[in-house]
Image (cartoon, rainbow, N blue to C red):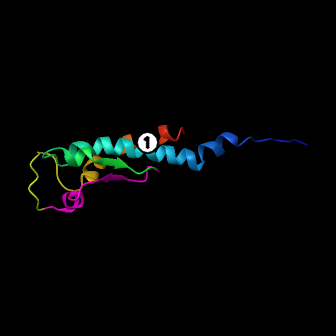
């Protein structure tokens, strides 16, 4: 008879809700930094008001006009390279960095 004991404590820690949340927060932090150059910057206020949800579930831009700038395609963006849907622009370039930030943050 052969008896095998498997210790799954390490795997359970890596898959814990806390670990996933830490990874998610790290990803959101990296995404916010990577999106910043694509966020319109007439006076820089929109960029300065970016915050991350406490659980890392989202990046928020806290100005009354943030949604309009994010979705509006016919707006005159004064800073070259900026414009609507800065999340799509940044993700097209930085997705691997975001995945790595999650993995590192979650300590996988």
**Horizontal and vertical percent position of residue 106:** 52, 41
Image point (17%, 62%), residue name: 72
**Horizontal and vertical percent position of residue 27:** 41, 44
Which sits in the foreground, 70 or 49?
49
Q: Residue furthest right?
A: 1
Image point (11%, 59%), residue name: 75
What span is in magenta?
55-73
- Residue 34 quadrant: top left
Which sits in the foreground, 80 or 46?
46
Task: Using residue 19 as the reference point, say whether residue 91 is left or right of it.
Answer: left
Instruction: Report the number of discs.
Output: 1
Task: Using residue 55 as the reference point, say whether residue 46 is left or right of it.
Answer: left
Camera sees residue 99? no
Camera sees residue 65? yes
Image point (60%, 43%), residue name: 14
Q: Quadrant of the C terminus?
A: top right
Q: Secondary structure at mark 1?
A: helix
**Horizontal and vertical percent position of residue 84:** 20, 56
User: Is the residue marked by circle 1 packed among few (<14), some (14-19), or many (20+) residues within 10 Å?
Assistant: many
Task: Using residue 24 as the reference point, say whether residue 2 is left or right of it.
Answer: right
56 falls in the magenta region: yes
Which sits in the foreground, 105 or 94?
105
Q: Quadrant of the N terminus?
A: top right
Which residue position is annotated with label 1?
26
Image point (48%, 44%), residue name: 23
- Residue 44 quadrant: top left
């Amino acid at each position: 008879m052969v008896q095998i004991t498997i210790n799954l404590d390490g795997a359970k820690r890596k898959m814990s809700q806390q670990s996933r949340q830490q990874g998610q927060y790290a990803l959101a932090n990296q995404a916010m930094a990577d999106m910043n150059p694509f966020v319109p910057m007439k006076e820089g206020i929109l960029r300065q008001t970016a915050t991350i949800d406490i659980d890392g579930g989202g990046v928020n831009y806290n100005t009354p006009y943030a949604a309009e700038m994010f979705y509006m395609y016919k707006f005159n963006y004064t800073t070259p390279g900026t414009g609507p849907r800065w999340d799509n622009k940044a993700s097209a370039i930085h997705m691997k960095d975001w995945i790595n930030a999650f993995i590192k943050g979650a300590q996988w």
